[in-house]
Amino acid sequence: MSEPSTNPKEKKREKAAPLLGCYDDLDGSCAHAWALLARGVKDRRSPFHTPGLATVSPQGLPEIRTVVLRGCDPQTRDLRFHTDTRSGKIADMQKQPQAALHFYDPSAKIQLRVRARLKLLTGEAYATAWDNTRPMSRECYQVTQAPGSPLPTPADVVFDAAATNDGADHFAPVVANVQQIEWLYLAARGHRRALFDFTGSNSQHSWLVP
Ligand SMILES: Cc1cc2nc3c(=O)[nH]c(=O)nc-3n(C[C@H](O)[C@H](O)[C@H](O)COP(=O)(O)O)c2cc1C
């Protein structure tokens, strides 16, 4: 870690947002990134709770939308979100499973750009995810028309628990297996940017020009 600054202006800024202990520590920055992701699952107020998920449409066009981060396992490097089987992002991932997730915490001044491979959860993992959903969340999946389909008026939308098996018929838990995380930490002392690559048998971490 760097020595504290002697520049008064910089010192003032660092007092407002103390420098991270992992400022010059590559492995520590990677661990911090995973800790922020794990917190994003549990803390609804964390900006990491609602990342942007980018996919590529079957027509080859970029698509991006907000999702709620529902799971994070640093051991398997899996993130999880939930969606509707009929949604655009499912059609996207079926043709192109490569996706990106974007996270930014303005108070921590940390941006993560995550490259991941998407996969639908099935079997026991699907059942566990469904069992843990709340009644309010289940309602979203009880809509009988496919999300994004045109409606004559908003009142024409139909929710039917019986016809949708309580919503389970349309529930799609998706795992994003993380391949790379690009870390960007904005600090008054000098920004820090790094790439954490998990694609090989051993993780490779390297600093990048910010
Ligand atoms: C704060 C917030 C959280 C959202 N969370 C989810 C989510 O977890 N899953 C989901 O499918 N859509 C979620 N949405 C809606 C998506 O952003 C998007 O509008 C919808 O899923 C349709 O996207 P698609 O047609 O690209 O699949 C959320 C939107 C907002 C604003």
Image (tube, rainbow, N blue to C red):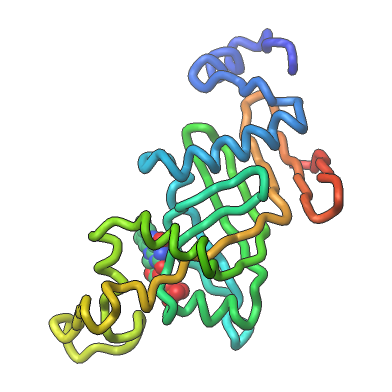
The furthest residue to the front: 124
Residue at image coords 53%, 69%: 122
Image height of 80 relative to 174, above or below? above
Point out residue 167 in the picture as x, y percentages from the top left corner. 30, 73
- Name the side, left or right, on which 119 lies relative to 16: right
Number of residue marks: 0
Report whether 177 appears left or right of 1. Answer: left
Spot occupied by residue 176 in the image (x, y as percentages of width and height): 60, 60
Work out whether residue 6 or residue 51 is closer to the camera in this orientation and state it.
51
The residue at 86%/51% (across/down) is 201
* Residue drawn at 67 percent across, 55 percent down: 178
User: Where's ligand 1: which quadrant?
Assistant: bottom left
Residue sitting at x 57%, y 61%: 175
- Position in image of residue 171 (x %, y %): 40, 71
- Quadrant where the image shows the N terminus: top right
Judge from the rendering whether residue 98 lies leftward or rightward of residue 200; answer left or right. Answer: left
- In this picture, residue 205 sits left or right of residue 138: right
Observer able to see residue 67: no
Residue 128: give x, y in percent of width and height: 44, 58
Quarter of the picture containing the C terminus is top right
- In the image, residue 200 above or below residue 104: below
- Residue 86, picture quadrant: bottom left
> Can you tell which quarter of the image residue 26 is in?
top right
Q: Is residue 81 visible?
A: yes
Q: Tell me where residue 204 sits by quadrant.
A: top right
Image position of 69 with respect to 209: above or below: below
